[in-house]
Amino acid sequence: MLQERLIINVLTAALETGADFAEIFAEDKISGRLEMVGGILESSLSGRDYGVGIRILKGNFSVYAFTNDSSESNLVAVARSAAAAIRGGGASSGVIDLRRAVIDNRHSVAIMPDSSQKKRAIELMRRAHSTAAAFDPSIAQTKIHATHQLQHVLIANTEGLLAEDKRVYTRLGISAVAEDGDQKQSGFSGPGAYAGHEFLEGLDIEEHARKASRIAVTMVKAGFAPSGRLPVVIDNGFGGVLFHEACGHGLESTSVAPGSSVFAGKLGERVASPLVTAVDDGTIANAWGSLNIDDEGARTQRNVLIENGILKGYLIDRMGSRRMGMPATGSGRRQSYKFAPASRMNNTFICNGTSTREEIIANTEYGIYAKSMGGGSVNTATSDFNFAVQEAYIIRNGKIAEPVKGATLIGKGIDCLSKIDMVGNNLEHGQGMCGSVSGSIPVNCGQPTIRVSEMTVGGRKGE
Amino acid sequence: MNIGEFQEALFAKGREAGFAEMEIYYANGRSVSVSVLKGEIDEYKNAQTGGLSFRGLIGGKMGYSSTERLDQESIDYLLEEARSNAEVLENEEPEELFAGSERYHSVNTYSPPLIGTVPDQLIEAALSMERIALDADPRIDMVRRSATSVSESEVLIVNTKGLNCHRQHSSASASIYVLAKESKDAKETVTGGWFDFSLRSFDDIDVEAVALTGVREAVSKLGANTVPSDNYPVILRNDAATSLLSSFASVFSAESVDKGFSRLKGKLGEQVAGGNISIIDDPLMENAPTSKAFDAEGSATARHELVKDGRLLTFLHNRKTARKAGAANTANAAKGGYKGMVEVSHHNLYIAPGTDSLDEIIRGTDRGILIVELQGLHAGTNATSGSFSLAAIGYLIEHGEIVRPVNQITVSGNFFELLNGIETVGDDPRFIGSCTSPTLKVSSLSVSGA
C-alpha cells in the first residue's frame, strides 16, 4: 500500500523531536451494504475508505494524527506537525530497518466479497424476508441487511515491524416487527463471521429469520417483566455480553493502567465464582472478532482472563504495556485509521461448565430466563453495567412459563460474577459490535447457559 | 486532485457512462484535541479527514457510492459502483436531483478566530481544568479525562442541475470526567463529568466552571444506594430528558412512519402529547451547534413546529417522502456522513421550554426521583414500540428536597405515554447537540431497585 522508502521517511520525520517510538497504520477498505425493507431492496451502498494514521510515543505521552492524503509530502508534513507536540528532547538517532513480518493466515476465505455477489446476496435476503414475514400474521414489517467489508491494513513502526493483512467480514442482519393493536415489538438476529460471501451461502438463513420473528411475536403479546432482585438464567451464545460488560471492559489496560478500573491491582485475587473461567481469544478460525494481527501489528493470542474465579490476566495494548510494565497481549484494536489503538476484546467467552440448560432451569423456583440478549454498557470505574434482554420468560417452579418484555438487567461486575452459581455445558458464540474509545469493532460474546443467583431486573411494577 | 477538478472530471466521465444527472456531496474536517492525565499530556490528536459521496441517475434509478480518495482511479470506482448499486434497486419511486432553493437564510456557524486557537492554549486549559478539579475537593480520586478541542468542517454539494451549496462550521470544546471516593480506602467509586462548547472563540469557555461542575456532578453521587421498587414521580433533568428524546427522535421522521417503524403513523392532526408539549425543529437558531442553512439535498432549511400544544402538525420530510405523502418538504434530508444515502433526520429538535426552574420543580415534589443520567440507551430503548427500560443515576427527593443520591435502579416506561404524562416542563434547555429537552417532570414511572 505504501512504499518502504516512504514509510522510512515518514517514521524518521516522526522521530525528529525526540520521540522513542513511531508507527504508521495505513488502511484501504472497501465496504458494501444492502438493505431490504418489506422484501424490497431499498438501498445498495458501497464505498472505499482510505487513510493513514501516524502515532508517536514518548514515554507515556501519545500523539496521534491522521489524514486521507497519503502523498509522501503530506505524510511527512503531518508527521512533523504531530512530532512538534513532543516537547523537549532532541532528535532520536538510529536507522529504521524494516523487516516484513510473515503473517500466518488462520482464516480461509473462499469467495472474496465484492459487487459481483450482490444479486446472489439479494436472493438470500429475500429468503430471509419470506421466512420472517410468513412466520406469523402479526409480523407487519421486516428489515434485512447484508454487509461486507474488505479491510487491507499496513502497519509499520520504528522497531522495524512491517506487516500487512487483509481482513474480510460478512454479516446478515434480520429485523422483524410484530404488531398487535397499538403494540409494536421488534426482534433481531445478526450472524456474522470473519469470512467471505461463502458465509451467507452456508448460513441457516431460515432459522435466523424465524428467530427474529419469534422474538417479535412473543414479545408483542408479552406482559411487562417484574421488577426487583431475582435469579436470572442467561442462555448461551450472545448472553456472553453479560461477561463482556460486567467484566471484559474492566480488564482492558485503558482503564486498568491509570487505576480507574475496579479490577486494577486484583491479579491473583478471587473476582468471580469458582465456576467461572473466562477467556479472550483472537485466534479462533473465521470468528467475527478474530484477527491474525492486532491493529498494532502484534499477533493475536488466547488470553485467559479468569480461571476458576481467580483473576489471571488483563487485555493489554502497547501503551498499556508501557504503563503497566506488563507484556502486550495482542489486544490493540481500532475501528479505522481515524482512531489510535486501544486495548479491546476479540472473542470473549465463559468456558463450559457441567450443568445442562434443563438442569439449570429445573433448579430455579422463580426467576427470569433471558433467552436472547440485546446490547449493554458499563462504567468501568464503578463497574455498574446494564443490558437489555430482547426475549425473556418467567421461570416458575423449575419450568419456563410466560414471556415478559422490557427486562433490563443491571448490576456491578465483581458482585455479579461472584453470584454465578450454575454454568452450563453448551458454549456458543454470538456476534456484536463493541463501541469504545477506539471506535466500533466486531467482537464475539460467548457463553454456555449460566445462572446468576440474584440480579436487579428492571421491569415495570404493577403492570 | 482538488475537489473542483475532481468534480469536473467525474461529471464529464459520468456523462459518457450514461448518467443522466449527477451530484457530489463532499465533506471534510480538521480538528486538534488534547487530553491530559496526571499533569502530563496524555494524548494529542490532529485529524484531517475528507470524503465524497456520489449519486447519479442511471436507468431511472439513483445509484450511490463513496470514496475517501480523490484520484483518477476513484472516478472509475465511483461510477461503476453507483451504476451497479442502481441496477439492483427495487423501489419504484422516481428520484431526481434538486436545482436549489430560491433563497437561503444565513446562519452564522463559522468563526475564523476560533480556528486560530493555538495548541498551547488547548494544552494549558486542559492542564488547568485538571488542577482545578483536583484542588476543588479532597474526595476527587482522579481526573480520568480533561480534554479540549477545536474543530472545523465544511460541506459542499454540487450537481448537474446547477445546485452549488457550501457551508463551514467550527466549534471549540472543553470537557472533564472525574472519579470520586469518600476516602482513599473507600470501596465505592462514583463518576461525573461536564462539558461546554463555543461556536465563537475558545476564550468564551469558562474552563473553571466546567471543572467545578464536573466535580460537583461526581461528589454529589457519593453514598448512592438503590431505592425500593415502586412507581415514583420522576424528574428527568435536562440532560437525561435530552438523551431520552434523542433515542426516540426518529419517530418524527416521515421515512420511519412510511416504513412502519413509528407509532405516530396516521396520527397527523391528532393529540399525541399533553397540551403543555410543543416540539420544534429549528435549524436556523443562533448558537446551536447543529444549525445549518441547507439540508443534504440542498433545500433551504426552515423552522417547523412538529407538535404544537400536544397536536401533531407534521412529520419531518425530505423531497422524496414529501412527494410520496403529498406533504410539504420540511427540508430535513440528512446523510449519515458522506457515506450514507439521503435519509430523513431532524436538524435542531427541541421541546419548547416552560417556565419552572429545576429548583422549583424539586421544591414542588413531595416524594420522587430526580434522574441526571440514563445508561444503555442504544439497547434499552425501542423506537418502534416507544418502550424503554434503562439503568439510571439520580437523587431521591423527599418533601421538596434532595435527600440522597440513588444508583442501581432502572426506570421503565413508554415514550408516547410519557409525552402525555408530563406534569411540568422546565425552563432550562441546554443546546449542545442536535436534540434538546428542558427538564421534564412525569407523574409516574416504574422504578426497579431493591
Image: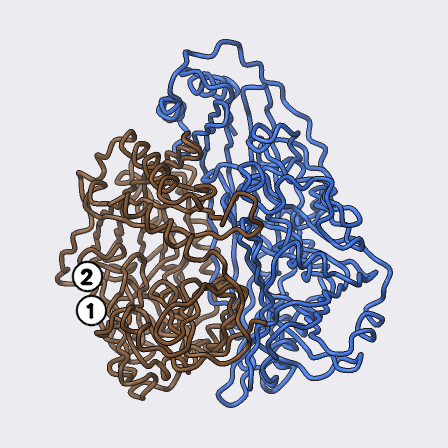
Chain colours: A blue, B brown
Q: Is residue B26 left or right of residue A162?
A: left
| Type of the residue with mark 2 | Met
The picture places residue B73, in percent across and down from the top left corner, at 43, 37
In this figure, which residue is indicated by the disc labeled 2? B285
Mark in the foreground, 2 or 1? 2
Quarter containing the C terminus of chain B: bottom right
Q: What is the quadrant of residue A145 in the picture? A: bottom right
With respect to residue A119, does A305 lie above or below?
A: above
The picture places residue A101, in percent across and down from the top left corner, at 65, 25
| Type of the residue with mark 1 | Arg
Quarter containing the N terminus of chain B: top left
Q: Is residue B88 visible?
A: no
Residues marked 2 and 1 touching at CB (< 8 Å)? yes
Which of the two labelled residues, at mark 2 and mark 1, occupies the earlier sequence position? Answer: 2
Circle 2 marks a residue in which chain?
B
Q: Is residue A434 left or right of residue A401?
A: left
Are tags 2 and 1 found on a single chain? Answer: yes
Give the secondary structure at mark 2: loop
Q: Is residue A299 visible?
A: yes
The picture places residue A211, in percent across and down from the top left corner, at 67, 72
In this figure, which residue is indicated by the disc labeled 1? B303
Closer to us: A17 or B400? B400
The picture places residue A228, in percent across and down from the top left corner, at 61, 74
Circle 1 marks a residue in which chain?
B
